[in-house]
Image (spheres, coloured by chain):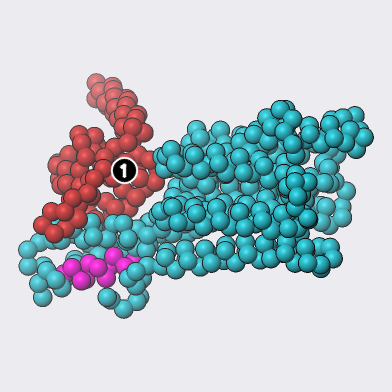
Amino acid sequence: MQEPSFLILTALAAGPQHGYGIMTDVAQISDGRVKLRAGTLYAALDRLSTDGLAEADREEVADGRLRRYYRLTPAGRSRLAAETARLRANAAVAAKRLRLAGS
Amino acid sequence: MGPAGLENRYRRLLRWYPAGHRAVHQEEMLGVLMAGAEPGRSRPGLTESADLLLGAARIRLRPGRALSDGPGWRDALAVYSIAAPLLVLFSELIGRLAGELGFPGTDRYWVSMMPELMGSGRLLVTTAAWVAIGGQGLVAVLALAGLRRWATAAAAASALYLGIPTVLQQLHLPLPAGISISLLYIPFTLLAPISETAALLAAPGPRRGRQLMRRREWALLAAGSALAAVLTRDFGLLLWDLGGESLHRNASLLAVLVAVLLLLALWLHSAPGKRLALLFGVLAYGLLLTEGFIDGSGPWDADTIIGSAGQVLVICVLTAVAYRTWRRSRPAAGGPGESPT
């Protein structure tokens, strides 16, 4: 899974968010390292929706602008959990090898 | 130039996105872009413009997008990839159950009526027929499980198994053992796996189709399966016995029935539903061809002309529906390169 997709799913794991909310949350989650732009965000959301990992939750109008909220699907939650476990396992192996190399 | 100028420039960039995507997301994306814009900015930055253009390219080039531009078509194909194999399978099961119960017009009915024509008293079911039925069952199960690649492979294999002998027959070449010629003129049986392969490749996937299928869609699928079961069990001949003067006249009635059902489905449903009705209309036309309800051969007497009129009607309805859905699927605003609105 590409990093933007992982971060978007992570942002949605806490609850439904609209597009701009996802962008700011992703920046916060990644300590400002990843700054999603609208083109990247909506291409990723389109793919995640197509894959059944995220879906539209509700719409509202704020300041005359349409806001659509997105949420994780059960499949998206499972996929994020699996991806987290995979990354954690890889990170554990990497840390162990670094310790061995350093000792 | 103020926010209005910036917004217009964003709108121009968003025209590079597919019409279907724009219809759903344009206003929302504009909101995000304007919320993220620095105060006083009058035109999009270079990086931002490139990001939007790349995003549009990614969405346009995504597998399955070319044949199914727009949520209507994509959703319709996703539902079709599940509903079509189930319809064929259910109709076969309903027909066989009716046969076991000895309903008029079914295999067992004809065996009982004309045992001398049926040899040992059992209708022959060839390997090709079982593969056609089993293949549809396999596609249906895999599609319901959300296994898109395996379902596509099963549909493609089924289409090849039935398609290759059909081509051999057309070329007057010897047929593989166990293949009956009578079962090879099978537009419906062949059309189903071919169209399912195309739908599975072009749509977002059967998982999306399963999400979209609600109680009404399942009810329509059940009704369609029952109708298909009736049509594939020589029910037309039963109508003939009941007072119709010719098979062609009954064919005309059945064609009208299909057209009415199609129009009803169009009237009732959403944009994806209308497209779905069109897809099933094509499949139904293949069914009528397969069962011989639509037949342009034979003497051109009044009955044949009436029968052909039904055929023409179905074609006209399908063409009108295709034109209407095409007109509606056109973007309201211009695409890339067109003048701004």
Determine whether B293 is above or below A73 in the image. below
Q: Is residue B40 magenta?
A: no
Name the residue furthest left: B39
Quadrant in the picture for the C terminus of chain B: bottom left
Residue at left 10%, top 57%? A63
In the image, taking residue A62 as reference, residue B273 lies left or right, namely: right
Q: Answer yes or no: is residue B60 visible.
A: yes
Q: Is residue B8 magenta?
A: yes
- The x and y percentages for residue A79 are 35, 33
Quadrant in the picture for the N terminus of chain B: bottom left
Name the colour assigned to chain A in the rendering: red
Q: Which of A19 and A2 is in front in this view?
A: A19
Residue at left 51%, top 68%? B323
The chain containing the residue under callout 1 comes to A
Determine whether B340 is above or below B218 in the image. below
Residue at left 27%, top 68%? B13
Q: Which of A63 and B286 is in front in this view?
A: B286
Determine whether B269 is above or below B308 in the image. above
Q: What stretch is highlighted in magenta?
A: B6-16
Type of amino acid under label 1: Glu
Residue at left 32%, top 61%? B22
Q: Looking at the colours in the rendered structure, which chain would you say is drawn in cyan?
A: B
- Judging by the rendered image, the residue that carries numbered circle 1 is A55
Name the residue furthest bottom: B339
Q: Answer yes or no: is residue B127 visible.
A: no
Q: Nearer the viewer, residue A90 or B76?
A: B76
